[in-house]
Image: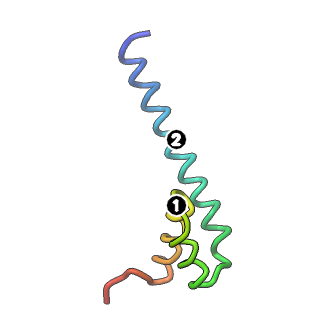
Amino acid sequence: MGFGSFLLDLGKGAVNSMQAKQENINRLKSEYRRYSDDELKKKFQSSSGDMKIAAMSLLQERGYGKKK
């Protein structure tokens, strides 16, 4: 196993990790879609990591954070 194989394995691991993270965010967004805007704001303020990203994404989809 050479250095090139090591880099390839490292890259594959990074891609798999990003895919798993995105799948988790999508799962959380699906769960949070039923939340009201106020509930999402509270979730955003009190969460971290993927939960915070999912709440923020839904709030942006609902028009929050956009300049008029």
Counting from the top left corner in percent of width and height, residue 41 is at 53, 79
Which of label 1 and label 2 is nearer to you?
A: 1
Q: Residues within 10 Å of mark 1 (few under 14, many from 20)?
A: few
Residue found at x 59% / y 60%: 26
Q: Where, by quadrant of the figure, is residue 29 drawn?
A: bottom right
- 18 left or right of 43? left
Image check: 34 left or right of 67? right
Q: Nearer the viewer, residue 49 or 14?
A: 49
Gap in angstroms between the C-alphas marked 1 and 2? 18 Å
Q: Residue at x 50, y 82 (%)?
A: 62
Q: Amino acid at mark 1?
A: Ser
Task: Give the secondary structure at mark 1.
Answer: loop
Determine crowd level at label 2: few under 14, some 14-19, many 20+ residues with C-alpha closer than 10 A: few
Residue 9 appears at what percent x and percent y? 46, 25
Q: Position of residue 60 (x, y in %)?
A: 45, 76
Return the disc, 1 or 2, that comes first in the chain's sequence: 2
Q: Is residue 2 above or below residue 40?
A: above
Query: On screen, 14 above or below 61?
Result: above
Residue at the far bottom in the pictured view: 68
In the depicted structure, whether residue 51 falls above or below residue 4: below
Q: Position of residue 4 (x, y in %)?
A: 36, 18
Residue on which the image places disc 1 = 48
Q: Which residue is mark 2?
A: 17
Image quarter of residue 7: top left
The three-letter code of the residue at mark 2 reads: Ser
Q: Is residue 25 left or right of residue 5?
A: right
